[in-house]
Every structure is written in structure tokens, then in C-alpha cells.
Image: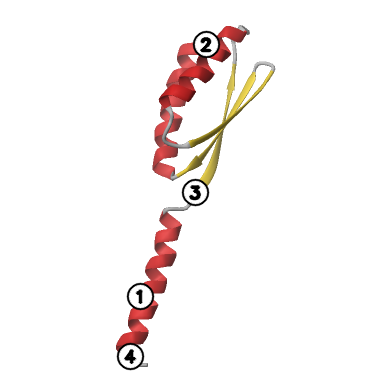
Amino acid sequence: MSLDTNLFILFLKFTTVVGDYFLARRKKTMRFYNNSGKLENVILFLEQVQKKITYININCTVDGRDIEVSLSGPQDLQYLATERLKKLADEHLE
């Protein structure tokens, strides 16, 4: 193989590795506490999460007053979902 072919193959391998790094899907977990103690508030919170955050994978777990939300997907979308989750928690869980 020629030097140009080897350089091209090396370039393709490098861009694939760098692209995979930036598109990596990491998992972020957020925890909230239902200060009001009302089940209705938790239900409203989860319904709003389901309606307003549709662009990322979400897993919610409720244990008593503790709510755990796990986000997985691209980091920029996780950031947007995090900000929206904080606002929804302020509205429904305080």
C-alpha cells in the first residue's frame, strides 16, 4: 500500500474514535425529594416529565418520598433535560 492509502486509513480510524467519544452516551442520575408528601404532586411531576422530555431516554423510580430519575442519551440533550427537570421539580415537589 502507498503512503497516501495508509494515511487515509489512519485518518478514518482517528475520526471514528473521536466521533464515538463525542457521541458517547453516558448515564446521569438525578434525585428529588417530595417535600409536600402528597402523592398527587408526584403523579403530576411524572406526567409532566413524560410530556415535556421526549427527546431522551428516561427511567424514573419512586420510593416513598424519594424520586430518582436516570437520563441516558447524548450529553447536550441530558443537559437540556436536567434544566427542565429542575424546573418541574420546583413547580410540583416543593
The residue that label 3 is drawn on is 25
Whether 68 is drawn above or below 56: the answer is above
Graded by Cα atoms within 10 Å as few (under 14), some (14 to 19) or many (20 or more), the crowding at tag 2 reads few
Please report whichever mark, 1 or 2, sits nearer to the chain's N-terminal start.
1
The x, y position of residue 83, in whole percent, is 42, 28
Q: CA distance from mark 1 to mark 2?
A: 52 Å
Q: Are marks 1 and 2 in contact (CB under 8 Å)?
A: no
Q: CA distance from mark 4 to mark 2?
A: 64 Å
> How many labels sit on residues?
4
* Amino acid at the residue labelled 3: Arg
Is disc 3 placed on a helix, strand or loop? loop
Q: Are marks 1 and 4 in contact (CB under 8 Å)?
A: no
The residue that label 2 is drawn on is 94
The residue that label 4 is drawn on is 3
The residue that label 1 is drawn on is 11
Is disc 2 placed on a helix, strand or loop? loop
The N terminus sits in image quarter: bottom left
Graded by Cα atoms within 10 Å as few (under 14), some (14 to 19) or many (20 or more), the crowding at tag 3 reads some
Nearer to us of marks 4 and 2 is 4
In the picture, measured across the screen, residue 19 lies left or right of residue 46, that is left
The x, y position of residue 82, in whole percent, is 45, 31
Is disc 4 placed on a helix, strand or loop? helix
Please report whichever mark, 3 or 2, sits nearer to the chain's N-terminal start.
3
Q: Quadrant of residue 60?
A: top right
Whether 57 is drawn above or below 5: the answer is above
Is disc 1 placed on a helix, strand or loop? helix
